[in-house]
Amino acid sequence: MKKKFFPLFALVAACNLQADDKALAGPKYVDEAPLPEKWPAPGPYNEVESKSYPAYRAAFTNGKGETSSFWTLFTHIKRNDIPMTAPVEMAMEKEDGKLSQAGMAFLYQNGKVGSKGPDGTKVEVRDVPAVRALSYAWQGDDSKENVAKARTALEETIEKQNSKTSGFRLLGYNGPGTPRDERTWELQALLK
């Protein structure tokens, strides 16, 4: 019995050490797709940082359903041979004091890819001007609790700095192939 117990104990101990090593290492960005040109990498994690974003081109849909919006945009980029990039951008609006998705965008590699204008009735390709944002990144899922935590951190910084904002956006850097606890998100307050 001792011979069978020891290997099991050793296996459990090794798994615990690996889990502890991962926790000690902290969040690490899982790079699945290229970022648009000159786009800053996500992070730092679990703190607010001011960031500058270049002008960019993106395909937008105003659908509020995350799954239907994603597939609408995915069909658009496949049909037009547009390479996939990260992140996916979700416009956020305040509803009953909470943030909820108001639209989604797939970012293009640069402003030379594709062409501006409508693509059917559900997608419009637009050029977006450069913007500054306060950003809070985390690793995990985009649960209401995680979004609320990020929003609280951003709003505390906005108040301290007496900043003016024009709204929020949520950036999702990973798809369903990445485990939920390894996905990177950034909630951003866009500065005026």
Image (spheres, rainbow, N blue to C red):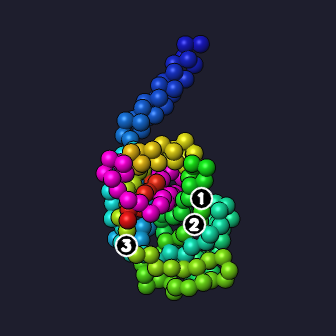
**Which residue sits at x=59%, y=65%?**
103
Whether 120 is among the magenta residues is no
Q: What residue is at 33 percent from the left and 60 percent from the top?
A: 51
Instruction: Give percent across and percent down for residue 3.
Output: 54, 17
Say what amino acid the circle numbered 2 marks. Met
Is 103 placed above or below 159 here? below
Q: Which residue is mark 2?
A: 104
Tell me whether the residue at label 2 lies in contact with that at label 1, contact meaning CB atoms closer than 8 angstroms: yes
Q: Mark 2 falls on what kind of element?
A: strand
Q: Which residue bears the numbered disc 1?
A: 101
Q: Is residue 111 left or right of residue 177?
A: left
Q: Is residue 7 visible?
A: no
- Residue 83's place in the image compared with 48, above or below, is below
Mark found first going from the N terminus, 2 or 3: 2
Q: Which amino acid lies under the numbered mark 1 shown in the image of this protein?
A: Gln
**Could you classify mark 3 by the number of other residues whose Cα lies within 10 Å: few (under 14), some (14-19), or many (20 or more)?**
few
Q: Secondary structure at mark 3?
A: loop
Q: Amino acid at mark 3?
A: Ala
| Circles 2 and 3: CB atoms closer than 8 Å | no
Q: Which residues are magenta?
A: 157-185
